[in-house]
Image (cartoon, rainbow, N blue to C red):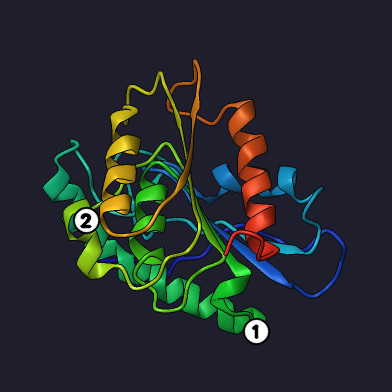
Amino acid sequence: MSRPIDGPRLAPRDGSAPKKLVIFLHGYGSNGDDLISLGQMWARDLPHVQWISPNAPDPVPGAPNGYQWFPISNLDPRRIEEGAAMAGPVVDAFIDQELARYQLTESDLVLCGFSQGTMLSLQAGLRRKRPLAGIMGFSGALPGGAKLKEDMASKPPIMLIHGDQDQVLPLGFMFDALEHIAAAGHGAQWHISQGIPHSIGEDGLKLGGRFIGKALAGQLA
């Protein structure tokens, strides 16, 4: 049974009350500590942002301190779609909770995911009626792309970054996501990191931080 989610938090570096919010969604078998380090890096340029990196709700069997948004044993698109649909409401409820906690709105929030966390960022973010400031997805995939046109409730700015040497979720998953997002009447920025496996390269870190900064400043809406 899924438990309430929470995880590492990083308060605004300038000591102020949070004016903007970034929620990280980690990959399969990882945990919130993995991505909060991105907040530590990006906070230098975004000192007014509250960063949160919750652990996914369910432990991964046999993986100490490893969590999953949904079980995934292969890349069957139908199983990914079903799993993301099941986990989406957990993320959605967490978003509601954190926006209320800091008295912010969707326009103050960027979802930033890696791998399975990117799947959930797209799943939850595109189905919210009020558009988020942005969705930043690394090395991920779009669940249920064929149904996106009927399911999409808003059109937040999106940036997808993927390594061309990714053997876990090959580069084709990014192009599949871009095609379905376009078919649904929306668009996304994208970037291929040369020589990068299932990870985030230096170029991705720079581009991701720049995208988040512009999105939170309302410069991409």
Indicate left or right for 192 with 1 as reference.
right
Rendered location of residue 130, percent (x, y): 46, 78
Give the Cα separation between the discs numbered 1 and 2. 30 Å
Location of the C terminus (image quadrant): bottom right
Query: Amino acid type of disc 1?
Result: Gln
Rendered location of residue 179, percent (x, y): 28, 44
Is residue 196 positioned above or below 7 on the image?
A: above
The number of discs equals 2
How many residues crowd mark 1 within 10 Å: few (<14), some (14–19), many (20+)?
few
The residue at 27%/39% (across/down) is 176
Looking at the image, do the residues carrying marks 1 and 2 touch, with CB atoms under 8 Å apart? no
The residue at 68%/45% (across/down) is 210
The one of 27 and 134 positioned closer to us in this rendering: 134
Rendered location of residue 77, percent (x, y): 16, 44
The residue identified by callout 1 is 103
Quarter holding residue 1: bottom left
The residue identified by callout 2 is 83
